[in-house]
Amino acid sequence: MRVLVTTAVPAERDAVAAAFTAPGPASASASAHTVPGAVLSRVALPAPSGGGDQLVLDLLAGGVGPAAAAASTAAALTAATLNGEPYDVVVSAGIGGGFQPDAPVGSLVLADEITVADLGAETTETAGAAGAAGATGTPEVPEPAHGFIPVTELGFGTVTHRPPNSLVREITAVTGARQGSVLTVSTVTGSAARAVELRRRHPRALAEAMEGFGVAEAASAHGVPVLEIRAVSNPVGPRDRAAWRIGEALAALTGAFGKLAPVLESWNPHDLTH
Ligand SMILES: O=C(O)c1cccc(C(=O)CC[C@H]2O[C@@H](n3cnc4c(=O)[nH]cnc43)[C@H](O)[C@@H]2O)c1
């Protein structure tokens, strides 16, 4: 089983690696290699004693934001395919903001939907009131934008990727993660009003981060299943850097990967029954 794990920054990548590289009788081997557009840290676990596939994880610190994440993930996926060693699953992993009170700081969120929240068009038309401004004539002063049309309703692309249900269920069970939508945003939410608006539009959202949708777009282009796991470092809402608990979240990420390795080892990538 070959797994590509894309994080944004090296601290997140190293937190994932720490789940496998602690010294011990059967510790994993670690190495690094470069492919065009990506530097990969490889963790190869010892083959399971009862037989079965060896778990190999390539860890990639692919950059902050959906564009960097998509570009670096796509580079790694393409290189692996050209080398005849394609990945079976891609995981977007890192810290994220948690919507309160459902995803407290320090908790884990596993995405059953990876949704881009700000890919679309602003509109002054409210839902169900399209054309209202036109009915009363041209407004004399510009109205504030108060609506959002996702790109899919404009006739383009996609806004949501769905990880395989079976894998999500099993990982939720072993890690104790909360399961819900994880939003991808290009701007970190910094106000209560924006947090409320995001939850109004996405009632199942538990967390927001900046890379999941980019990773998922690359995985989807290669026909590879995708997961997203976030350890909550801060509440989504008014900007308060003092409230961030990055160390706690990175430790939670390490704990999660320690537990999900056996699930990945035993998962059959050809069983994509949702
Ligand atoms: O508030 C700031 O000054 C600030 C400046 C630069 C970067 C940030 C980040 O939030 C880093 C984003 C980084 O971490 C993930 N992340 C963590 N919490 C959140 C969040 O509440 N909303 C969105 N992304 C978050 C994200 O995936 C990036 O990789 C802040």
Image: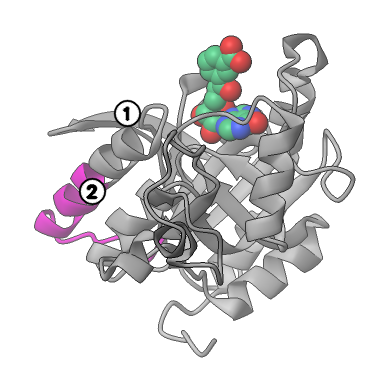
Instruction: Residue 18: tell me if it is visible.
Output: no
* 53 over 243 or under it: above or below: below
Residue nearer the viewer, 25 or 260: 260
* 186 over 99 or under it: above or below: above
Instruction: Residue 70: tell me if it is visible.
Output: yes
Placement of the C terminus among the 4 image quadrants: bottom right
Q: Which residues are magenta?
A: 74-89
Return the residue at label 2: 74
Q: Is residue 129 left or right of residue 154?
A: right
Label 2 amino acid? Ala
Return the residue at label 1: 32
Nearest to N terminus: mark 2 or mark 1: 1
Picture residue at 74% right of the left edge, 45% below the top: 196
Label 1 amino acid? Ala
Q: Secondary structure at mark 1?
A: strand
The image's colour scheme reads one colour
Picture residue at 57% right of the left edge, 50% below the top: 183
